[in-house]
Image (cartoon, rainbow, N blue to C red):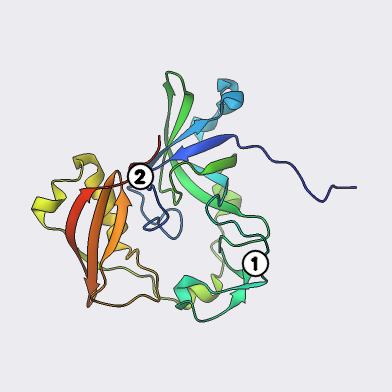
């Protein structure tokens, strides 16, 4: 008989530029410019475990919503993309509030590097995870079975994909490390605000790569109004 609870082990943690949840892309692959590193826990740093992985272009990450746990689960949730005012079955959504807080993301494998004190590290792009998110498993993405051209996206096919025009004054953009600017612009263009927040006077703060990027959105244009030192990801 299968036990009611199955023990799982954290095999790795991902390190990204997002110290908080706000601003993290809503799905993996939306912002390919985002780079991240996957560092294995000491027990799993055997290089033989990665033998052959570089032959694959993309990977599946199985991970834990470590910042979205609840004592009880609910059968319905209110997806943010529906404005937060329409309920859907939890298993018809990718909500983090599930019986088991497990996430699934596809990322592009950019390379494998050896790092002193860390062993073999995976360099990936397109991740939608917070810094430090625990990884439960890594599997290769197989195009011949994982890409279904006939697939239907349910209610997500009828929801507009939010994008905005970004206005980032040069003197503020210069405060962001040069190698992070392209990714930050792509993150902002996805309109990181919750779908139900449309107040044009409200100021928002997005923590990215150790910078607190403050902005407002009016008539489809996101304008950055300040960039200050913020909370750095804990690498």
Q: Earlier in the sequence, mark 1 or mark 2?
A: 2
Q: Residue 115: image x %, image y %? A: 42, 22
Compared with 78, 99 (above or below) is above
Foreground residue among 107 and 215: 215
Q: Residue 222: image x %, image y %? A: 22, 67
Residue under label 2, please give it: 17
Any part of residue 167 in sight: no
Compared with 139, 199 (above or below) is below
Please give left or right for residue 148 compared with residue 215 in the image. right
Q: Alpha carbon of mark 1 to alpha carbon of mark 2: how far?
A: 29 Å
Please give left or right for residue 75 compared with residue 133 in the image. right
- Evaluate if marks 1 and 2 touch, with contact meaning CB atoms under 8 Å apart: no
x 45%, y 72%: residue: 81
* Callout 1 secondary element: helix
Please give left or right for residue 233 compared with residue 99 in the image. left
Residue under label 1, please give it: 91
Q: Residue 33: image x %, image y %? A: 32, 47
């Amino acid at each position: 008989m299968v036990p009611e609870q199955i023990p799982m082990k954290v095999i790795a943690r991902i390190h990204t530029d997002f110290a908080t949840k706000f601003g993290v892309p809503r799905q993996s692959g939306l912002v390919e410019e985002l780079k991240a590193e996957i560092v294995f826990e000491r027990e799993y740093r055997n290089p033989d475990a990665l033998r052959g992985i570089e032959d694959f272009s993309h990977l599946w990450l199985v991970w834990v919503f470590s910042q979205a746990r609840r004592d009880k689960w609910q059968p319905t949730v209110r997806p943010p993309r529906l404005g937060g005012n329409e309920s859907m079955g939890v298993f018809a959504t990718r909500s983090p509030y599930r019986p088991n807080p497990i996430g699934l993301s596809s990322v592009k494998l950019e390379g494998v590097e050896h790092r002193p004190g860390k062993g073999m590290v995976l360099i990936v792009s397109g991740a939608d995870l917070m810094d430090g998110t625990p990884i439960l498993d890594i599997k290769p993405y197989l195009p011949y079975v994982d890409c279904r051209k006939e697939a239907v996206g349910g209610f997500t096919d009828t929801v507009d994909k939010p994008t905005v025009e970004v206005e980032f004054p040069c003197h503020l953009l210069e405060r962001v490390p040069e190698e992070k600017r392209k990714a930050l612009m792509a993150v902002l263009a996805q309109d990181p605000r919750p779908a139900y927040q449309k107040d044009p006077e409200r100021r928002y703060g997005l923590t990215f790569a150790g910078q607190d990027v403050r902005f407002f959105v009016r008539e489809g244009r996101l304008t950055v109004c300040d960039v200050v030192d913020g909370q750095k990801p804990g690498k």
